[in-house]
Image (cartoon, coloured by chain):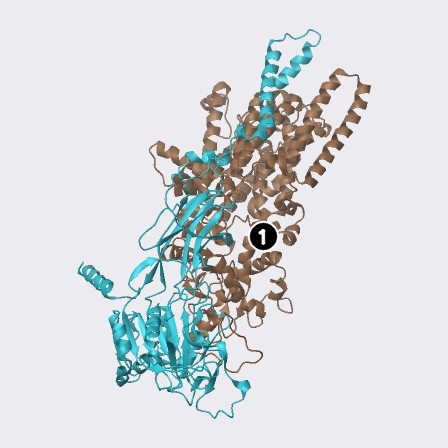
Chain colours: A brown, B cyan
Amino acid sequence: MALTDSDNPASFFFKGETGRNTRGLLRLIILCTIAAAAVASRLFSVIRFESIIHEFDPWFNFRATKYLVQHGFYAFWDWFDDRTWHPLGRVTGGTLYPGLMVTSGSIYHLLRFLAMPIDIRNICVLLAPAFSGLTAFATYLFTSEMSESPSAGLLAAVFMGIAPGYISRSVAGSYDNEAIAIFLLVYTFYLWIKAVKVGSIMWGALTALFYGYMVSAWGGYVFITNLLPLHAFVLICMGRYSPRLYVSYTTWYALGTLASMQIPFVGFLPIRSSDHMAALGVFGLIQLVAFTEFVRYQLPTKQFQTLLRASVFLVFGGAFAGLVLLTLSGTIAPWSGRFYSLWDTGYAKIHIPIIASVSEHQPTAWPAFFFDLNMLIWLFPAGVYMCFRSLKDEQVFIVIYAVLASYFAGVMVRLMLTLTPVVCVAAAMALSQILDTFLVASSPEDNSTDTSSSKANGAPSTANGSANANAIKDKLAAAFSPDTLRSTKSPVVGIYSYLSKSLIAGAITAYLLLFVLHCTWVTSNAYSSPSVVLASKLPDGSQHIIDDYREAYYWLRQNTAPTAKVMAWWDYGYQIGGMADRPTLVDNNTWNNTHIATVGKAMSSREEVSYPIMRQHEVDYVLVVFGGLLGYSGDDINKFLWMVRIAEGIWPDEIKERDFFTSRGEYRVDDEATPTMRNSLMYKMSYYNYNALFPAGQATDRVRGSKLPAAGPELSTVEEAFTSENWIIRIYKVKDLDNLGRNHQEAGAFEKGNKRKKAGKRRGPRVLRVE
Amino acid sequence: MRLRILGLIAGFLGLVSALSAQGNKVLVVLEDEADKSKYSQLWAGLSDRGFQLSYQTPKATGLSLFQHGVPAYTHLLLLPTKSKGLGPNLTPNLIVEFVNAGSNVLLTLSSETGVPSAIASLLLELDIALPPDRNSVVVDHFNYDAKSAGEGHDTLLLSSTKAKAGLKDYFSFPSGLLALPHPVGQVLGPASPLLSSIVKAPSTAYTHDSKSDSTTESIDDVFATGNQITLVSAFQARNSARFTVLGSAEALEDKWFDASVQLPSSSSNAKATAEKTSNKAFAAALTAWTFKETGVLKVESVNHRLAADTPKDSTSKAVTGHSFLNLEENPSIYRIKNNVHYTIALSEWSHNSWQPFQPATSDAVQLEFSMLSPFHRLNLSPSTTQSTANSTLLEADFTLPDQHGIFNFLVEYRRPFLTNIEEKRSVTVRHFAHDEWPRSFAISGAYPWIGGVWITIGAWVVFVALWLYSAPAKPRGELKVQGGKGGGR
């Protein structure tokens, strides 16, 4: 296929009208293959483990979906959940993004309608891979708008399909909002670019529609809400205002805002919170600009200049003053805490420990970029640079998107997700440029003919590097249209040597293959663990499944009353709700900081303090995660300081973080642990009876690598109810009040046979009974 | 099946004979089988009331409070023993376990035999302190029986005391004096709400070690004096098991049941005459209470529902169509600001039947509607519309608070001498559903906005109509075409 002569019969398929159809068909097949690859690479977890919902948040989404399927849409919309946040309950229907659940609910009902009754769990498990196929397609469309090279779109699609940065949130079982939100994000951007290019109300309305869908699906919609106005604003500042922009922006803003306000959780936020004010401001600005353009048409230039200057200052000053006034008076909510933490990475740690305590809100470590994006990360700047070469409206968008997303990804690990699409797009543009240049077997023609000849050829290029001389023309010149930057107008220097061509092509192929290898490796090793089930390797290399979580949750499910309240740190709230089906005090929807702090206080206080708290909240069981035996580092003792910090935020007089550190400022659990630490309920519950596993004095904590005190802690107000096989989950039952009115320490001492001191000889004044 | 029939028969038998609300098997532990005859009137009285008495000595091998892990007897009567403890089958731990299992204990003490230290430490668990001396006795130089204790002044004669306000009276006897020979005084812990005294010593009484020489004892060392000494005390555990301590075991003996006693003659009471004791009546009342023949409360039923007259005001108009407003009984979910009707039926066991429970005067059963803390605390009032033969219907109507969450209808009624009632019903109080808010046109404050919407729509239609049907003026044609391109596509 490398070289085809004009008399080759195959050339029939690559020339003229038939050629176009052939290329279209090929493109379709390639896209389908990409989608299949995207889905396939996300199935590791199902093959390794089983069809199971992963991690934490997906368990809630799964539970909500089941509720939706079981009770119908309106009941879901008005759902008051009395099995979480006991005893406050949660207005779940009004405090979630329903897009994900409604999507899988619709798929469920559609499949049933088509006489394919599929278990809702399997739909939920496989939703993310299915949508990643769609994301690949959306990326293709988006990139095709950016680059004239037909190969760029396909490359971007395949990158998007297998980039670990996106796979991390969309493997099978990762049933989270991001599963559909990234598709919606990319597709909304595609529609926006289309709208700006065409300037039609239809595309603007479609943008608004998908924006509304996005709002219903993920809190990250704010990214779009700010990126699109920023794009419009930059275009206006660049003097690129056009009626196309006006039409698409106003259409999007008006319809999109209305659509977003239909989601109860969002409600009036679009007109009341600072996060959304940029969109409103640009909406006002674009009206002004449009009006100015209109006036400029009517007035002589001199008068117009004066008028413009005066009005711009007046309006801008007025609007800004109004905004400040409204913010101060409280009509417009100030920026949310999560937003501040985007600018000041230390902000959350001081002011909102609950946000800082989430690992995915931490700043990104730099190797993570390479880990998640591999070679794309160094192609990415090249692609952004190429956007500057032909700086049309849509390329401006890519530049803005790239800058913003890079910053955010550096600040928060989980925003790597929003960076991935733009990296894929930019890298694909750069790579397609290289491929288009170096994969052409024939020598480049004279420069003068380049511009004319390139118009006729919209031939696709296959990403795997097989060169087709007829199909692929030199597309380099196509990037240069006469009215772009002057610096780019220099003549093209062609590649004539086969050696350099094959060298580069070979290198790129090798890189691509390495990329695929890396992605597969990362996906299979890092991102396919359900984290509900842990896997470890035995000495002989065979896989050993550690299933303590499910063991404990099923114990709860089968051995406790259906209304038994379980107190655990909020990380496990959704899992307990989903797997054990028991009411919890706090869960991963961290809407009530005080309630979480209450649990933190109960965990970090002495038993005598904790017990009344637990009684008041009607706690029946307490669940702690303990990794000391197995060396499982994500356990509660390691999270304990966050509990202390969050509790300290509410009760600074009663809980002090300092008390949990030794005088040398160390966080220890061994003999030198502080009394506060050793008397805390969490410490006691973690290490209760742990000594019994070891010979006397040999008890060691394998996570913190320290030897434990010879005498283990004593518990009086709770009693051990269950400990899982590897001691990862320990469940304690909260004792009822003593039947004889004693406190639990006294009752425990009596049962052990210790006689109470006679009350005969009392010091001090006698306390008389008053009746 | 056979078991079930047997159970039924047993149940019937129990119904016919037992007078206790709980059960009729009584274990009597006494030092010596020979002592049995001393209390023959008491045994006869108990048997007449339907109790099955078993007698054991502490050292008997077959003595066990539990059988197959559950209490073998419902009631335990402990008569004084001379030994230091009660043996391995009646350790304090076993007795506490017995009480925790819901069984009742009547413990009698006597200063003649002395109080075993095991008993003293058991009582300490209940927050009842005994004098440190083994043979301590309560002495009163004003209220003693002149006939039998003219020397020692240690047989106390007490007249019936009235129950305190707000408490029901179970122990008063109509006339006569209660004779308590050689009583052991108890001091109740200052704060325990589970304890209450049935008979207190007169204000002139004090404790005294009968074995020691009275002259060596200094006044400061007196263990307790006056009203602080309780002669008969009642302990009711959280599970309503009763533990009664009778300071004088001899008061139950036959000879004191029909003895005649006489208060000392003094200046204020010059004409003291011999009287018959009312020990028999008191013993009957005391055993009746301890063995749950009196003062046992039962919740017959708890009902809550939406009030029948849920107002049709503007906010709840939308609700009437909602499915759950069909006044179903005990729904698990309510909405904020619903009007709710709560009823609880209480009955009290009185010797042989369930009677409607009447709280004491100046007392009331209260209902709390609580989440973390009570949002409502209401006195329940007897129903005027409904009545049943053996229970009182107490009810309350109220409006749910404007706070959603998981609430409890909680009736917690703990009074001395009455078994505890803790009736908790959890309900969910949800928020307004999306279709339960008043419609916009029902809110007068919304008229400007509704007007604004329709004016905008109307103006737009008019504008479009004008735009479409007005011919473009010639000199500005170009301009309008551009504008049309922008806005029309």
Q: Which quadrant of the figure has residue A695? A: bottom left
Residue B62 picture quarter? bottom left
Q: Residue at x 26, y 85 (%)?
A: B34
Q: Nearer the viewer, residue A388 or B29?
A: B29
The residue indicated by pointer 1 is A354
A201 vs A543, nearest the viewer: A201
Q: Is residue A234 left or right of residue A353?
A: right
Residue B312 at x, y percent in the picture: 46, 35
Is residue B138 something that shows in the picture?
yes
Q: Residues within 10 Å of mark 1 (few under 14, many from 20)?
A: some
Q: Amino acid at mark 1?
A: Ile
- The spot of residue A30 in percent (x, y) is 47, 32
For the C terminus of chain B, the quadrant is: top right
Q: Is residue A399 above or below residue B386?
A: above
| Label 1 residue SS | helix
Q: Chain of mark 1?
A: A
Q: Residue furthest front?
A: B271
| Residue A391 versus residue A661 in the image, above or below | above
Judge by depth and name the residue closer to the eye, B392 or A600. Answer: B392
In-image side of A393 versus A728 (left or right): right
Please state which of residues A668 and A488 is positioned toward the viewer in this rendering: A668
